[in-house]
Amino acid sequence: MIHDQANYERDGEDVREPLLSEKGQATVDVREDSPLPDDLTREELTLPNPSEPETARHYTRLSQMNWAIDAGPYPLGSCTMKYNPKFTEDVAADPNAAVHPDRSARSAQGNLELQYRLQEALADIGGMDAVTLQPPAGAAGELTGILVTKAYHEHHGNDRSEVVIPASAHGTNFATAATAGYEVVELPSGEDGRVDLEALEAAVGDDTAALMLTNPNTVGLFERDITEIAEIVHDAGGLLYYDGANLNALLGRGRPGDMGFDVMHYNVHKTFATPHGGGGPGAGPVGVVDELAPFLPTPRVREAETGPGYERFEPDRTIGRVHGFAGNWLVLIKAYAYVARLGDEGLADAAAKAVLNANYLAERIDLDVPFGPFHHEFAATAGDRDAADVAKRMLDFGVHPPTTKWPEMVPEAMLTEPTEIEGQSSLDDLAEAFNLAYADTGEALDAAPNRTAAARIDQVGAARDPRLSWQALDGE
Amino acid sequence: MSRANGTPYAPHTDEETAAMLAAIGVEDEEALFDIPDPVAFDGDFGIEPRTEREIRDECARIFARNDDLTEFLGRGHYGHYVPSVVDHLADRAEFLTSYTQYQPEVSQGFLQALFEYQSMLVELTGLDVANCSMYDAATALGEAATLADRVRSTSGDVVLVPEQLREGKRAVLENYCDGADMTVETYPMADGTADVDALADRAGDDVVMLYAESPTVRGCLEERLAAIGDLADETGALFALGSDVVALSVLESPASVGADVVVGEAGSLGLPTSYGMGLGIFACRDDFLRQVPGRLVGASEDANGDRAYTLTLQTREQHIRKERATSNICTNQAWVALRAAIHAATLGPDGLVDLANDCVRDAEALAARIEGLSGATAPVHDRHHFREFVVHVDQPAPAVAEDLEAEGFAVHAIDDHLLQVCVTDLNAERTDGLVAAFEEVL
């Protein structure tokens, strides 16, 4: 038997790393040794039973079939895949931080202090007055912010039914507004890729609860008219929501609070370099201006009103909760450590280098970039090629491709965000991968990728005939 | 080569920065920013940069301000011993520093791990489909309610939940229900579990989802789940069952009692006690496949005909379907799911069942010892318990909890004269101390 990175050859047949279930399962008679009566228990349980060495080898082999920021560039637009400093893992692994959420405030002063310090740092960075750390992800932060918005309007006796969202916004904005029970009013992009003030004037009105805006937007453009935008929304009685996905571009140079935003979320797994872990966990703290602070989720943390230390308190008109406990605590610790490591200069430099890198990379690639001046990310167009095919071909050149076919205002978009962590030579390599893939003809593109653990995967088939567990594979 | 003061995580030397600026054709980095002056910021947050070592010391000092208590705390967040192999494998950078698997050809490892996690939950719930994570049990319950709203076979708008439910869980549920114009109402409990007769009186076509838990927030095992399932079936309500990944390894299969959806906590495997950070379970019947919230990993084939894995049925999700998506979730708890799967694999079915049986036996044994103390009665509810149980104390419970804390033990005070105590493999060897402390303070 031989194997390469992805495949074993066994009896002349290629097989991938087997499933745990294929390596061997055991069935336990649950009732045999149960302290519970039979009618409360299942008869048996069948699960894999690998030994520890087999477990280690299985997951190590799986890890070898997985791209990661530590393996190379990961320039997914709007995802801000930056290096995750190792020491933050050690800070978060402190056993003293591993306490139960129902501890009394008195006995968990350390956790409360760190929560308070992070709240303060985030408030400063966003130009906000109050911050909650409870939302466990960016989309959960959005929902929190929109629920706060809703509660605010209801408190003031305003029944507003619509949330206005630019067409180029992240899908989560639309889904969040709908989850909170709002109608979505989609704002078409202006010709320059930004918000069109006339279209905005036409879209907002007495029914407008909020405008959700990403700034710089999803093709990296700063909304230059942000002051006018804020005025239009506020004059209509609406609130201005800041989607923090692109905050990395602004660090130290602009604060949502100073631009007229009333409520925002931070994606700490983007801007503050906590690891994405294959899709999560992240954390989506929410900042608000004073007027909205009474509506934030409960509990919040503040300096104790009497005596030293910190205490939890319930905001007067709280929306309740958005997570069962205190959010994704281990992630929040890492964010605190990252912010502390960089400080003012480091944060501003992160933004500077992120914007420098995006502009340098765009300069080096043969693809057109229709909209500018962009900041930390740009949307190149693959023109008459299929952006998804170009992306697959890029995999063959040892890089991860950008986000493809989004946002839709750029045809065959390749939304690219190199972040500050790539150096010049790495960006040159990335540019070469772009250019080689873009130069390829139809056939080579169709066949790509062919140097990866798996060749091109049939996604249509996966959806047509969903097999979502090893039980569903039985008999194959 | 030199690097100006700035982020330590950017590789640029000053010379490279200069060369890159020249290639772009600008003087300096500032020229690349298109932020109008009136809204520009001077960069003064007042955050002093610290070295790695300073930050480690600083955070260690901060966390040392947490009292060193032996916790007998549960009520939805549970600590079990997490074997070292879980940390070492999950911390591999290829897992930890990867993103959502939008390019499956270079993400086979994580996709397979998530596929295996989904499969484990299919076995544990008996249901057809499990997604690859929600944030926690509370948000998973909220998502179940919105699913119930979409697949409804009744005209009602009531989500019916047990009156004894963790307050935070209910608060989250209410926020998800609010946007769909559903309301949350409660049904009574009798001695720690559902009052099924009262529930039968209440059930009707105004109920769109019926939720029950086993174990309950008080650690009681629900004894009449099948009857609750029948009630839901008769009235056309969706039956959502809340549980816990360890408990599921021994309890009757949710599918066998008629559960349409299973939600709950899986972070009790893989995660240490972590201030409430969790891993939400979401599993359901095949019928709701296209209404499932969150990400699903499916098996497919690559161009060579080999089995391969990919995110699938993405047209349910926000990045495709926008305001018509089944949920707004994007970033999830994938890495925590990986940890839970590694932990489950390490235990194997024998280890899981042993762990679950200990959760029953240890709770029963500790309750019996507390029952022997004067001034205390335990367990309050005449039920089978899992990990935790309620104690009646003659003295005011908050005062007793405070006194126990002074003795180095944390328990819940849940009512004027009710405490709640949770025992797992992490604190089972400290029960002598807890009992002695009880004797001291009662």
Image: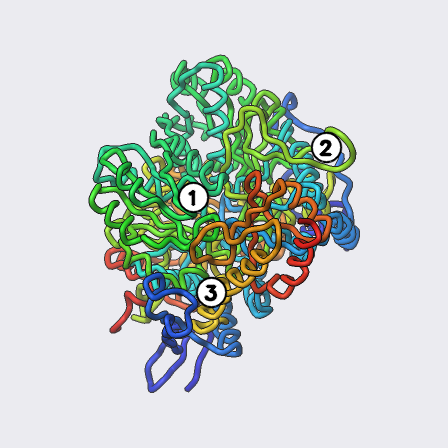
**Closer-to-camera residue (B408/A226):** B408
Q: Secondary structure at mark 2?
A: loop
Q: CA distance from mark 3 to mark 1?
A: 31 Å
Around disc 2, counting alpha carbons within 10 Å, would you say few (fewer than 14), some (14 to 19), or many (20 or more)? few
Q: Residue at x 24, y 56 (%)?
A: A464
Kind of residue sitting beneath label 2: Ala
| For residue B368, side relative to residue A380 (left or right) | right
Residue A3 occupies which quadrant of the picture? bottom left
Q: Nearer the viewer, mark 3 or mark 1?
A: 3
**Closer-to-camera residue (A339/A140):** A140
Q: Chain of mark 2?
A: A
Quarter placement of the N terminus of chain A: bottom left
Q: Chain of mark 1?
A: B
Q: Secondary structure at mark 3?
A: helix
Which residue is under mark 2?
A: A304
Quarter placement of the C terminus of chain A: bottom left
**Viewer can see residue B323:** yes
Q: Nearer the viewer, mark 2 or mark 1?
A: 2
Please, which colouring scheme is shown? rainbow
Residue under disc 2 on the same chain as residue under disc 3: no
Q: Chain of mark 3?
A: B
Which residue is under mark 1?
A: B329
Coordinates of residue B334 in the picture (x, y in percent): 47, 55
State yes or no: discs 3 and 1 in contact (Cβ < 8 Å).
no
Kind of residue sitting beneath label 3: Ala
Which residue is under mark 3?
A: B356
| For residue B240, side relative to residue A316 (left or right) | left
Coordinates of residue A49 in the picture (x, y in percent): 44, 75
Around disc 3, counting alpha carbons within 10 Å, would you say few (fewer than 14), some (14 to 19), or many (20 or more)? many
